Image (tube, rainbow, N blue to C red):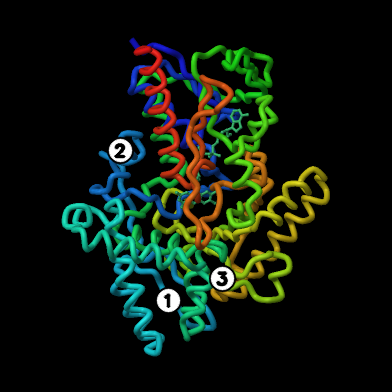
Amino acid sequence: MREKEILILGGGVAGLSAGIFALKKGYRVTIAEQHNIAGGNLTGWNRNGFHIDNCIHWLTGTNKNSGLYKMWEELGALGDGIKVVKNEALYCYEKDGQSLSLWRSIDKTAKEMLELSPKDARRIRKFRRSVKNIMFINGIGGKKHNESGNIFNKMASLASILYFNRMSVVEYGEKFHHPLLKEFFSSLMGPDFSMAAFAFVAATYCGNNGDLPEGGSFAMAEHMIERFKSLGGRLLTRKKASKINVEDNLATSVTFEDGDTIKADRIIVTFDPKMLFGKLLDIKLPRPFKKIYESKAFKRFSSIHAAFAVDAADVPFKGTLVVDIPEDLQPVLKAKSCIVREFSHEKKYSPEGRNIIQTMIYMDEDNSKGLVALAKNRAAYRAKKDQLKAAQLELVERQVPALKGKLTELDAWTPASYARYVGSEIGSFMSFVMPAGKAPVSIGSRVKKVKNLFLATQWQTSPGGLPMAASAGKKAVETIEKTDKKRRNA
Ligand SMILES: Cc1cc2nc3c(=O)[nH]c(=O)nc-3n(C[C@H](O)[C@H](O)[C@H](O)COP(=O)(O)OP(=O)(O)OC[C@H]3O[C@@H](n4cnc5c(N)ncnc54)[C@H](O)[C@@H]3O)c2cc1C
């Protein structure tokens, strides 16, 4: 008999995943989500007849033979009837008239690197070998890597990870002679990540395991919501939790901003722990979290964006382009590179003959915090947002001259938009960077002082992201099951 009620606060990927796994284990489940739709960061929205995709650049786990695929299938995010879009390259980095792509084939990428810089041949070959080795870690390179991986492959993959984890993407780039290669590795994810994080992304993508579910972020969230509801889950929207009521080390109920109170046997919180402890809950931030939030190495980050409409025929590239931010725009945009995406692979995002261009510029913790604080002053924030929007337009027009005079503004958003929308402290949408020389963060689901309160958040691991959010949901349910079993057997 497992008919106990679980109340989940937050209907993002972590909340939906916890909900689906809990329903499969026989619990009754309610998700309370503050907005009118679930999905959290996994979302998109419409503007002037165009659809803006907020999230997926690559979804780890799209290879049918990977362990993560099975999880996405259980969650309804991938599987029968859901096509996976495979672009030719994950991104193309352009600098001073030259370009280099991370192609689906790591051999093709290495060949292009060698053509650019024969002087870097030894290091390029080592990079190619290491990415191939890393495909054997948890079979992220798909079937062959699970099945034909022997002890030597496993040892080689570990050696590659340990080597790459010693340095940041910037430090690794500095080992190359060619200017394009020097910056290729740090251009995609910003300068604070370890090279191991980049190598994982490359191994995932080149293992056909990091592609795009058709319909993008909004459709993926819809599929998960459908799965949750079809299993009998109850989704309450416009339900913002304001207080978790605790008596004798047990959470008895949750009070919501609309005045409602809902009782539950078990409660799972899925949003930023910084917004839970000392706020919704009268308990200080637990030490493992405090350490990580205050750490200088495990920084948080967010991003600024703009979206533009364009005639499809005017877009001179396919997929994702990464360009440098000219020096004179860096003091405004606070970064060195910008991701520029087009969406020709999603025909339904734009009217016939049209396309969308979206920019994404990572913003570090301090600058993100600054924008979130500024948003309290509406006029000042609006002026700043307009300045950022104009700078992004100028940047695209300068770095992709074919687009000059062709772009019509659709929208712009900042870390303050994320802070408002998903309620994270500094507008972060992932957790912490994976810095060089550090082991990844791993914090359990239990809340020490409240026996029936559990966490299913991406902030328990680094760097967060969709698979980690979904896995956090799964783990929280497994922890609840274990706790229940122990109690039944006691
Ligand atoms: C621009 C961008 C690009 C990204 N690209 C990728 C990518 O390519 N691949 C990848 O894997 N990941 C990517 N991510 C990250 C990914 O979107 C997140 O890791 C993931 O969606 C986090 O899910 P979550 O459920 O943990 O958190 P969230 O999405 O933050 O969900 C938390 C939910 O809780 C709700 N909530 C908050 N407070 C309350 C409250 N008091 N009461 C009720 N509800 C509340 C929020 O409204 C929200 O719905 C990207 C994100 C962004 C923004």
Q: Which corner quadrant holds the N terminus? A: top left
Answer yes or no: do the residues labelled 1 and 3 have beta carbons within 8 Å? no
Q: Is residue 60 visible?
A: yes
Answer yes or no: do the residues labelled 3 and 2 have beta carbons within 8 Å? no
Give SS at disc 2: helix
- Whichever of labels 3 and 2 marks the residue nearer the N terminus, that label is 2
Q: Is residue 252 above or below residue 155?
A: above
Q: Nearer the viewer, mark 1 or mark 3?
A: 1
Residue type at mark 3? Answer: Leu
3D distance between C-alphas at marks 1 and 3 = 20 Å
Residue at 68% across, 64% down: 333
Residue matched to label 3: 403
Give SS at disc 1: strand
Residue type at mark 1? Answer: Leu
Residue matched to label 1: 100
Residue at 57% across, 41% down: 288
Q: Nearer the viewer, residue 486 or 194?
A: 486
Residue matched to label 2: 73
Q: Residues within 10 Å of mark 3 (few under 14, many from 20)?
A: some
Residue 13 in the image, given as x and y percentages of width and height: 46, 37
Residue 339 in the image, given as x and y percentages of width and height: 53, 64
Q: Quadrant of residue 337?
A: bottom right
- Whichever of labels 1 and 3 marks the residue nearer the N terminus, that label is 1
Answer yes or no: do the residues labelled 2 and 1 have beta carbons within 8 Å? no
Q: Is residue 81 above or below residue 199?
A: above
3D distance between C-alphas at marks 3 and 2 = 39 Å
Q: Is residue 64 left or right of residue 259?
A: left
Q: Is residue 314 visible?
A: no
